[in-house]
Image: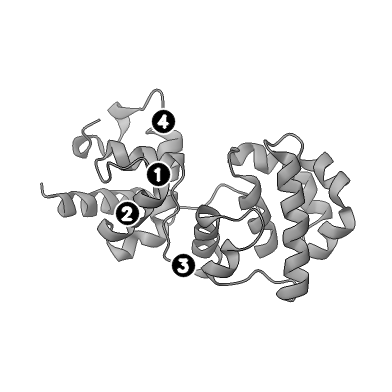
Amino acid sequence: MQKHHKIREIFERFRKNNQIPKSELISHNEYTFVIAVLLSAQSTDKSVNKATYGLFKIADTPQKMLKLGLEKLIGCIKTIGLYNNKAKNIINLSKILIEQFDSKVPQTFDELNKLPGIGRKSASVIMNHLFDGSYIAVDTHVLRLSNRLNISESRNPKDVEKELLNVIPQEFHKNASNWMVLHGRYICTAKKPKCDTCFLNDLCQY
């Protein structure tokens, strides 16, 4: 099977298996989704949801977050890795949203990418989830699947992102990252992939 046919078949199967994949991060509005994504860097969605369960009850807007303050914020998220830096970024991000964006989440990739604690991957996730974007966010799961499925041979996330955008048909871009993340989280795991139950096993050389 030619590579472009194989890639289309892979994503056709992803769509058939899970037509509209959802982020597992729990949020209540656009602002809390951005905060959850920021917190998820190098942390599991499960650990983020556990921390934000209480946090979002008392601070679900930029104004409430600033009122909560840095020390109390740290207390809410101290179970998450890199919590000190993430707390500082959340406070600074909240100030910027109030001062520059009328307390709303900006709706362009470039504006999101400039916010404290929001890099390319996070901006891509936010654009796709909140604003019907067509980006591909490359995390460890997406990188692993790209290599195992022989979609990309690169180990550099930025290079993989560019390649995936080129070789995956446009119609799949919006959901590609979520499909690959969920597949990597539950089926194509790092140490013990469940190849015998994988619906892509006949297309995979791993």
Q: How far apart are marks 2 and 4 (CA)?
A: 20 Å
Callout 3 touching callout 1 (CB < 8 Å) = no
Answer with mark 4 or mark 3, whichever residue precedes in sequence: 3
Q: Where is residue 29 in the image (x, y as percent from the top left)?
A: 68, 62
Please tell me which residue lies in front, 141 or 171: 141
Q: Determine which residue is flagged by label 3.
A: 133
Residue appearing at x 18%, y 49% in the figure: 6
Residue appearing at x 45%, y 53% in the figure: 137
Callout 2 touching callout 4 (CB < 8 Å) = no
Can see residue 3? yes
Q: Distance between the residues labelled 4 and 3?
A: 27 Å
Local SS, label 4 = loop
Q: Position of residue 26 (x, y in %)?
A: 64, 50
Callout 2: few (<14), some (14-19), or many (20+) C-alpha neighbours within 10 Å? Answer: many
Q: In which quarter of the image is residue 51?
A: top right
Q: Determine which residue is flagged by label 2.
A: 164
Callout 4: few (<14), some (14-19), or many (20+) C-alpha neighbours within 10 Å? Answer: some
Q: Determine which residue is flagged by label 1.
A: 142
Q: Which of marks 4 and 1 is in front?
A: 1
Q: Distance between the residues labelled 4 and 1?
A: 11 Å
